[in-house]
Image (spheres, rainbow, N blue to C red):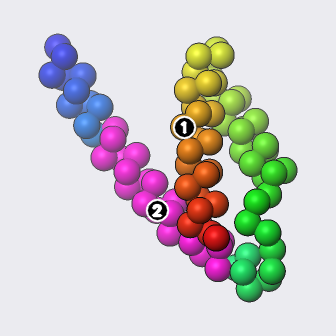
Amino acid sequence: MIQEYRKKLDTIDDEITELLLERLKIVKKIGEEKKKQNIAVLDKGREEAIKERLASFCDDDNEKNYILNIYENIMSESKSVQM
């Protein structure tokens, strides 16, 4: 049973990785546009809107904390790439 769950997790991890790499490509393009247009990398309003949207998927505070902690890291890395 554990092996079956791990196999499912491996598949999910592969999909997440593919999506994160796709996201990274878009983040880089946004960074290039921000530089061309002289726009600041940090957009607090956008970050808060993302957090609110993602939190709406969660059923309880544990899920919300889990998702928001992951996205804090994703957004932090995204900003680093854009600088």
Residue 26 appearing in the image: no
Q: Residue at x 68, y 30 (%)?
A: 55
Q: Amino acid at mark 2?
A: Glu
Q: Where residue 6 appears, x then y in whole percent?
A: 22, 27
x, y (%) of residue 79? 64, 60
Q: Which residues are magenta?
A: 12-32
Badge 1 element: helix
Estimate the spatial distance between the alpha carbons at disc 1 and disc 2, rounded to whole Å.
Answer: 17 Å
Q: Say which residue label 2 marks.
A: 22
Residue behind mark 1:
70
Indicate the secondary structure of the residue bearing disc 2.
helix
Which of the 4 quarters of the picture holds residue 34? Answer: bottom right
Image quarter of the C terminus? bottom right
- Residue 27 included in the magenta stretch of the image: yes
Answer left or right for 37 relative to 63.
right
Tell whether 71 sits left or right of 46.
left
Specify few, some or many for label 1: CA neighbours under 10 Å numbering under 14, 14-19, or 20 or more. few
Main secondary structure found in the magenta portion: helix
| Residue plotted at (57% across, 72% down) | 28
